[in-house]
Amino acid sequence: MRLVFATSFFVIATSLSAAPRPEHVVIVSIDGGKPAVLLESEAPSLKKMAGEGAATWQASTIFPSKTLPSHTSMLTGVGPDKHQVLWNDYMPIRGIAKVPTVFSLLRAKEPEAVTAIFAGKMKFRHLWQKNSLTLFDFGGPQPVVPAASNPEVEKSKIPSQAVAKQFAEWLKTNKPRLAFVHFPDVDSAGHKDGWGSPQQKEAIKVTDQALSQVRKAIEDCNLASTTTVIVSADHGGHDKTHGLNIPDDMLIPWVAWGAGVKKGHTITQQVTTYDTAATALWLLDVPIPTEWDGKPVIDAFE
């Protein structure tokens, strides 16, 4: 019995330590990407990456299933009870997230690491911690000190293909250890016309083309063999809204593609959005804080 326990412990310990160690990790979020709607839409790039890599269409977000709280969990590895980002608008008075992000933890280990956020919504400034990013892009590079409050700017969105173009251009001269790319179009269409509407499916088609730009940029820069890409979402939706603790709102996709990823694999491990942060740190050989809720999705990797 002791031998079985010791062997099991050794296997678990080895699995956690034997990460594929890519040189680069890119996290892509399809805002409002409800799996059921994605799967019945024209999204060849996403489906190809899922088929070539490892995927589950049954991952979960956090509650409340809203954009800023969910993305904060995605990039900090903890639930809302710990990160306390419960608001969902850009509100400079609330300051910056108080728990460390994947970017700040990477920089703590590798101070010169190149890191970036390409955001489709200004509210992601709440995740821009001091000395954590090489670049925060919102329709172009943003200054460290935010400008005076401007409701029109704060509520504006950068279209997915424009976000992808900014990332692709920047990638030509920068080789990030860690980058986050956010596509807002699917969520915007859901709020305007409804989740699963023809208009939202068209937005998925357009966003999938943006995802293709990201993948092509990685390949064109000869980074495909050393880069792991994680594609996920912050929440789903129902009718013209989201935020409830129901499957329509809580289920999200989780796709890993690239360096070290199993080929054509269906992930059986239960995945929650804060596992994205833990997986990114694990891949980059950065210690995962013991207080994190997130665990690396080791089932997706060789």
Image: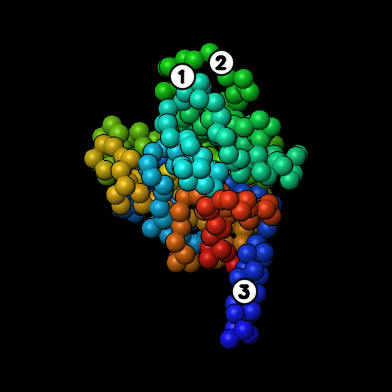
Q: Quadrant of residue 134?
A: top right
* Residues at marks 1 and 3, CA–CA distance in whole angstroms: 52 Å
Q: Which badge, 2 or 1, is on the more N-terminal residue?
A: 2
Q: Determine the residue positioned at 53% across, 13% down.
A: 148
Vertical position of residue 200 compared to residue 45: above or below: above
Is there CB contact under 8 Å for labels 1 and 3?
no
Q: Which residue is mark 2?
A: 147
Give the residue pinned by disc 1: 153
Disc 2 vs disc 1: which is toward the camera? 2
Q: Residues within 10 Å of mark 1 (few under 14, many from 20)?
A: few
Question: Who comes first in sequence, dot 1 or dot 3?
Answer: 3
Residue 211 horizontal side relative to residue 115, left or right: left
Vertical arrangement, residue 43 with respect to residue 107, above or below: below
Q: Do the CB atoms of the residues marked 2 and 1 lie less than 8 Å apart?
A: yes
Which residue is under mark 3?
9
Residue 29 image point, x, y percent: 47, 43
Q: Do the CB atoms of the residues marked 2 and 3 lie less than 8 Å apart?
A: no
The residue tagged with tag 3: helix, strand or loop?
A: helix
Q: Residue at x 47, y 32 (%)?
A: 120
